[in-house]
Structures are given as C-alpha cells and as structure tokens.
Amino acid sequence: MTPGLPSPASLGSLAVDDVVLTGVRRRAEAPAFVVVRAEGPDLEGHRALRHEAFVRHQGLFTASDRDDLDDDPRTEVLVARAPDGTVLGGVRLAPALPRTPDGRDLGWWRGSRLVVSPRVRSSRTAPGVAAALVRAACARAEGLGALRFDATVQARHADLFDRLGWTRGDRVDLHGRPHVLVDWPIARVQRLVDATKAALGGLLEGILDGDVQPSVGGPSYLGDDGVPLPGTDVVAACDAILPSMVERDPEWAGWCAALVNLNDLTAMGATPVGLLDAVGARDASFARRVLRGLGEASRAWGVPVLGGHTQLGVPAALSVTALGRTTTPVPGGGGRPGAALRVTADLGGGWRPRYTGAQWDSSSHRTGAELRALGDVVPALAPQAAKDVSMSGLVGTVGMLAEASGCRAVLDVDAVPAPAAATAGDWLTCFPGFAMVTADRPGAEPARPLPGFVTTATCGQLTDGAGVGLRWPDGVVTEAVASTVTGMGPARGTHRRTHVPGGPR
C-alpha cells in the first residue's frame, strides 16, 4: 500500500499504546513479532523500509517518499517488531484533513505507507505481518476518535483488504500504478445503538399493541422524551441512572438524575414543575449522599423535589420522574423528509473525571440562572420535532428522531457543534450534558434569542429512507446507523400531517 492505507478496527477499542498484537505462528519456525507504536529507532526502521520499497525497489518516488504528514505532530506510526528488535514492517496513520479553525479534528483518518521488510516479504510470515499491521491501524484509528478510516492501496494488494473486511471503492492511478480506494466500516455508533436502544421495540410489543398506548404517550408521541398526559397540559418524564454510576459517584448520580429528566422536559418544550425520586441504598449514609446531589440540582434549577421513595439495605439504585407543563408539547417524531436538522449544545465545561469520553460535564459549573435559561431553548427554536441527546449519543439520538419521523437522517460532520477537547468519535457517542437535536423547515431561525453560552448550527437534514449517514467534507456519506434505532417505528398522529417543510407549522 502506498500513500494511503486502511482504517477502522476489527479489534474494536483496542489501544496501541504498548504491545497490542502478537503475530500468529503459521509454522513452528515462523518468527514471532509484536505490533507497537513507533518511536526513535523504530521510526527510523520504518522510514528505511519505506525508502527501500517505494523508492529503490518500486520506483514510486524519485528521491524520497517523505511528505508533509511525516512532520504533522498528530501522525502516528505502528511497526511490527521481531524479538531481536528488528523492524519487520510498519504503517502510518494521520488525519485526512487539517484541524478546523476552532482546533478540532473531524474524525476522518487515513492509513498510508504500509510496508513489509524484505526479510519476511517472500516468506510465509509476510501476510501475517501485513494483516497484523492493518488490524492494529484500524484499532488505533478508532482509539484516536476516528469515525472514518480509509486508504489508497495498490491494486495488487487489494485482496488482503477484502479478506480483512474492508470495502472497495473507485480505482485510481497513483504514481503511475493502479490503486484502489478502500474503506474500513467503523461500527462505533452502531455498537452503541445496539447496546442501548435496539431491544426496545421487542421489549415494548405488549405495551404498543392497539391504537391507544398511554404508557408511551399515545401514537403521536411514540418513544418521546416525555409523556403528555391525556386531557391535561402535564408532561411527565422518567429516567434511571446506571447502578454502577450510583455506586461509584452517588452525589454526581443525584445531580445527573435531575439533569437528564429536566432535559427531557426541555425537549418537549415543557416548563418543569417538580421531581419525584426513588432511591435504593445499602444504608442511610449512602442514601444521604445520593439525595445531597439531587438536592443541589433541585436548588440550582429551582425545581422542587415533591416526594419519592427510599429503600435501605438494597443495592444502589436511583430513578427520578419529572413533571412539567405545556399546552403545545413538541413531538420527537414531527419531522418530514426535507426538514433541516439543528444541534444546539452547551460546549462549556469538560470531561467528567473518571468518565473521559463518556460524559461531558457542561452543567456543574453553571449558575442557576444559566441552567434555568436552557429550559427556553426548544420553545425559542419552536421546531417541528425535538429530542435531547442522551445515552445513545448524538448520532443515535438523531437516529431516534428520524425513526419516529419515518425518515433517514444525514449529518454534516464538519457542521456539528463540538468542543475542541473531544474527539469526534467521543463527542458523537457520549452523553454531552446539554444538547438538543431539532428538525424544522430549511432556513428556519430561532423565534427569539438563545442563551449566549450555547452553540447552535444547522448540520444535516431528514430524507427518505432509514438510518443515519455521516456526510464528510468531500461529499462521501458513511453509514453510522444501518436502519432503525429502537425498532418501534414511526410515530403516528395529526401533528405530523401539519408540519410540512416550507409550509406553515
């Protein structure tokens, strides 16, 4: 493979910080090897192999195969190293694009300069070395937050990438030789969706049978963040916190229990009225820590805890129900093909300690007035459809809004508001603190000003079809979610017939 290699990882989240791969012995005499991140002599060994293969042997370059990527501080090299320290092969990984003006990487990485030493090139070990390097590159790219990983490989080596699960693209001529574009299908978003939401449709079959579904808000609000209570202006929302999180960080769990429920009310355009809690704890001391966090959140948002239930002598558990009021609840399934997708998020704060890559804490440093101002975001946007980003991440949440709307969604990766401190892979799959996904007419703007500390941008659209695609700056769309997220299907109701992109709402 020449200027361009593969990406993603069949090894999932495996990191290549130390020894990560051991070569498979095909014969007893085959030399063992490991794949490691290259530094110092290993880097020089890789560069020497590159020069021998691409300059002297293949004549792809006249004097040197070095380029700007070799000087990019983000570039990494992985090498296969024999027990005696000899470099048997290597591969280079680098971002495909410069950083954005605000300092972000978009999550598009590219592999290149895959090379195997003449010492093993003609032996039975060579395919094992090459395959191990490709797999390790895929794993490392995903560990670096990549959501797209591709390469341009010499056509004579394309079969290797076929066997490793890569997808072939166009044929191109490069350096006077036939090459093939190949892409590794990163499944990070799909794995998250499958783990958190995919079972819902089957689990709720008994509840969803029939025309009236009071447990999930009725057919017009199927799968919404909150439940409009029939015959009233009351909206109810209920969320539970992971027991492991309650056990590990009880005060933070109490805070987040209020946060996620109040976000649910915000997504429905409802004004919060109060909270109800259910707490399980091993003893009174532990329960007091959970309730301390919930009480701090109650005071910060100015929403009272109206009542609840506490049980001692049991494993840690916490769930909260929030009650709000609105005469015009915003559905999660109110979008139509052609509607523009908008993301509005608080990018302040940073990763919660011990939850890096999973939970972005945008709330604990905010004043009560700022937190309460977030409740006006959806009413100010007055969208056709809205959902708050929660456990399925931003892309998964977009998929749920699209599914409930009977649509497919396409997100423009470079337009999604994101903090520079988070990789694309982490930001699009984490719990972001406060982030709302809305759908509305193309060109629609907020009806009134949003809080000055939130960032909002139109960053995609709903189309015919299903699933979620990520559109990159070169126009390529990669699949993040293959089909539906929850399996519950589209919502049904009169509100969807009144929301036509470009027409009155």
Image (cartoon, rainbow, N blue to C red):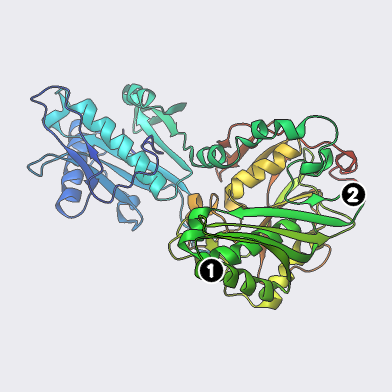
Viewer-proximal residue, 374 or 305? 305
Please give the name of the residue rendered at 71% of the width and 62% of the height, measured from the top-left corner: 276
Residue 36, visible in the rendered structure: yes
Q: Nearer the viewer, mark 1 or mark 2?
A: 1
Tell me: 444 left or right of 467: right
- Which secondary structure, mark 2? loop
Q: Nearer the viewer, residue 22 or 43?
A: 22
Q: What percent of the width, then of the height, locates residue 483?
A: 62, 31
Q: Is residue 321 left or right of residue 483?
A: right
Estimate how packed mark 1 is, as few (under 14), some (14 to 19) or many (20 or more) residues with alpha carbons within 10 Å: some
- SS at mark 1 in the image: helix
Q: Residue 162, how many percent across, how many down?
A: 38, 23
Foreground: 493 or 278? Answer: 278
Q: In terms of depth relative to the viewer, which is nearer, 95 or 175?
A: 95
Q: Which mark is residue 56?
A: none
Which numbered disc covers residue 284?
1
Q: What is the C-alpha distance between the residues marked 1 and 2?
A: 51 Å
For residue 289, above or below residue 230:
below
Query: Which mark sits nearer the N-terminus, 1 or 2?
Result: 1
**In this rendering, is residue 200 above or below 124?**
below
| Relative side of 360 to 177, left or right | right
| Type of the residue with mark 2 | Arg
Residue type marked 1: Ala
Give how far across and how far down residue 136 sits, in percent. 31, 39
Residue drawn at the location 86% of the way across and 59% of the way down: 326
Categorize mark 2 by other alpha carbons within 10 Å: few (<14), some (14-19), many (20+): some
Image quadrant assignment for residue 254: bottom right
Circles 1, 2 touching at the beta carbon (< 8 Å) = no
The residue that disc 2 covers is 505
Residue 349 appears in the figure: no
